[in-house]
Amino acid sequence: MDSLPTPVTSAGRDGLGAVLSRAARAIVVLDFDGTLAPIVADPEQARAHPDTLPALTSLAPHVASVAVLTGRPPGVAVRLGGFAGVPGLEHLVVLGHYGAERWDAATGEVTAPAPHPGVAAVRAELPGFLDRFGAWQGTWIEEKGRAVAVHTRRAADPQAAFEALREPLADLATRHGLIVEPGRLVLELRPPGMDKGVALQSYVRETGATAVLYAGDDLGDLPAFAAVEKLRQNGVPGLLVCSRNSTEEVTELVERADLVVDGPAGVVHLLHTLGETLASR
């Protein structure tokens, strides 16, 4: 059995120790894209790392809860992750749209409030908006139900396109009561109050967790990192894990993490080792 890695911070070491010693009241919350699934040019082609399900099923019986927290609609994450009907994951929860929608493996149902009207208005306006800014070539729109995202990964100069669109899209979002959340060569327009920090804190309250492990890879995970840091201040230990992509590293996430692993392969190896360690106790 492999040994668990040692976090580089004292808070992280306390967090990992609490997850091990309080496993029955610990939760493990995981981003999807870039954390459980490798980043690909077309999000519809993303699939969970092949070792994800074995890792989750080895860990889930030993902790209070395992949840996937993603900006995607929960049904999409379930499909791309292959999470439905997996023995050992009967209590898995997918918190989609940054927690605005939820899928429970126990019922197979998605629960959600009514969508924000600004999303439909932006969705209708975006094609002409991008064309007016000369940004249509190489950019594309991803429909996310409760949000809409503009990707620049396929543009001739992806970073330049990203920067050129950042302010105009922020203005468009504001006109419709939305905000813009930047990611890795993507700008997502969504309602305010939808972020991973809010969702994570809500799930901690719901479960009564006394220890938290959170793993993510992108700018959208920073609110969840901040939530764990706040939980620590309030006496709930936590471990922050960064899934590092060598070609598209998010420096701030790396710097704030207690533990940095090499992409989804590193994340699932960590989860599997954690499950084996808890099983041996």
Image (spheres, rainbow, N blue to C red):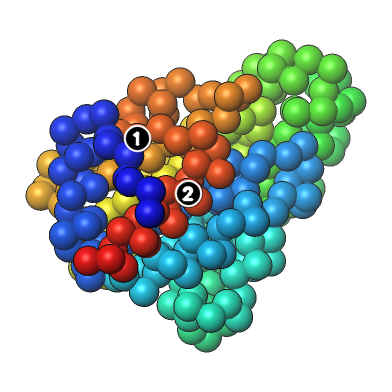
Query: Which residue is farthest bottom?
Result: 107
On the rendered image, what quadrant is the C terminus found in?
Answer: bottom left
Residue type, numbered disc 1: Leu
Could you say where residue 149 lies in the image, as x and y percent from the top left? 68, 41
- Looking at the rendered structure, which numbered label has been put on residue 269? 2
Could you say where residue 240 lies in the image, as x and y percent from the top left? 33, 40
Query: Which residue is farthest front?
Result: 1
Would residue 171 be seen by someone viewing this image from the given angle? no
Location of residue 241 (image quadrant): top left
On the rendered image, what quadrant is the N terminus found in?
Answer: bottom left
Say what secondary structure mark 1 lies in: strand
Badge 2: how crowded within 10 Å, few (<14), some, or many (20+)?
some
- Looking at the rendered structure, which numbered label has been put on residue 20? none
Badge 1: how crowded within 10 Å, few (<14), some, or many (20+)?
many
Side of 189 relative to 120 (left or right): left
Q: Earlier in the sequence, mark 2 or mark 1?
A: 1
Could you say where residue 108 lies in the image, as x and y percent from the top left? 57, 82
For the residues marked 2 and 1, what is the alpha-carbon distance in whole angstroms?
13 Å
Tell me the residue at 82%/28% (across/down). Answer: 154
> Which of 14/158 is in front?
14
Location of residue 244 with respect to 75 vertically, above or below: above
Could you say where residue 35 lies in the image, as x and y percent from the top left? 53, 45
Q: Would you name the residue on which mark 1 appears? A: 259
Say what secondary structure mark 2 lies in: helix
Location of residue 30 with respect to 245 vertically, above or below: below
Q: Nearer the viewer, mark 2 or mark 1?
A: 2
Location of residue 277 (image quadrant): bottom left
Residue type, numbered disc 2: His
- Count of numbered circles in the view: 2
